[in-house]
Image (cartoon, helix red, strand yellow):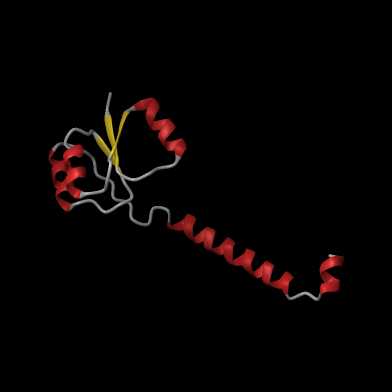
């Protein structure tokens, strides 16, 4: 069974899915030395934090595929921000109605 090092927290659904397919090892902290030590025995690594640069070269030398996806969730963040602005605008519009209008509609 493959061993995957989890450096940062991930969604519970992701934990459940991974647990069915791999042995998960959780890093107790994000100290670079801890990550280096645990990564030596891992087949994969999941993180949202910046990793020490030498981990990339070590992983590549071992044949481990590296995927660095900065901004991978940028569209989701933009969609959330747009919806939050619309919700705020709607709330502000309701706040500025006269009290009689609030009860009517």
Q: Image height check: is 48 above or below 61? A: below
Q: Residue 16: percent from the left, percent from the top?
A: 43, 31
Q: Image height check: is 52 above or below 40? A: below
The C terminus is located in which quarter?
Answer: bottom right
Residue 73 horizontal side relative to residue 70, left or right: right
Residue furthest to the front: 28
Number of marks present in the image shown: 0
Q: Residue at x 73, y 76 (%)?
A: 96
Q: Residue at x 28, y 46 (%)?
A: 67
Q: Residue 50: percent from the left, percent from the top?
A: 26, 54
Q: Residue at x 16, y 39 (%)?
A: 37
The N terminus is located in which quarter?
Answer: top left
Residue 19 horizontal side relative to residue 28, left or right: right
The residue lying toward the viewer, choosing from 57 and 9, is 9
Q: Image height check: is 25 above or below 104? A: above
Q: Residue 36: percent from the left, percent from the top?
A: 17, 43
Q: Quadrant of residue 27?
A: top left
Q: Residue 101: percent from the left, percent from the top?
A: 84, 71
Residue 47 horizontal side relative to residue 53, left or right: right
Q: Residue at x 77, y 74 (%)?
A: 97
């Amino acid at each position: 069974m493959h061993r995957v090092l989890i450096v940062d927290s991930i969604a519970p659904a992701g934990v459940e899915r991974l647990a069915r397919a791999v042995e998960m090892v959780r890093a107790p902290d994000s100290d670079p030395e801890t990550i280096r030590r645990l990564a030596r025995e891992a087949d994969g690594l999941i993180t949202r934090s910046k990793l020490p640069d030498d981990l990339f070269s070590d992983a590549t030398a071992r044949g481990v595929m590296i995927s660095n996806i900065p901004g991978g969730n940028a569209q989701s963040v933009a969609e959330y921000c747009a919806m939050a602005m619309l919700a705020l605008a709607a709330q502000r519009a309701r706040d500025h109605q006269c009290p009689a209008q609030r009860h009517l509609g």
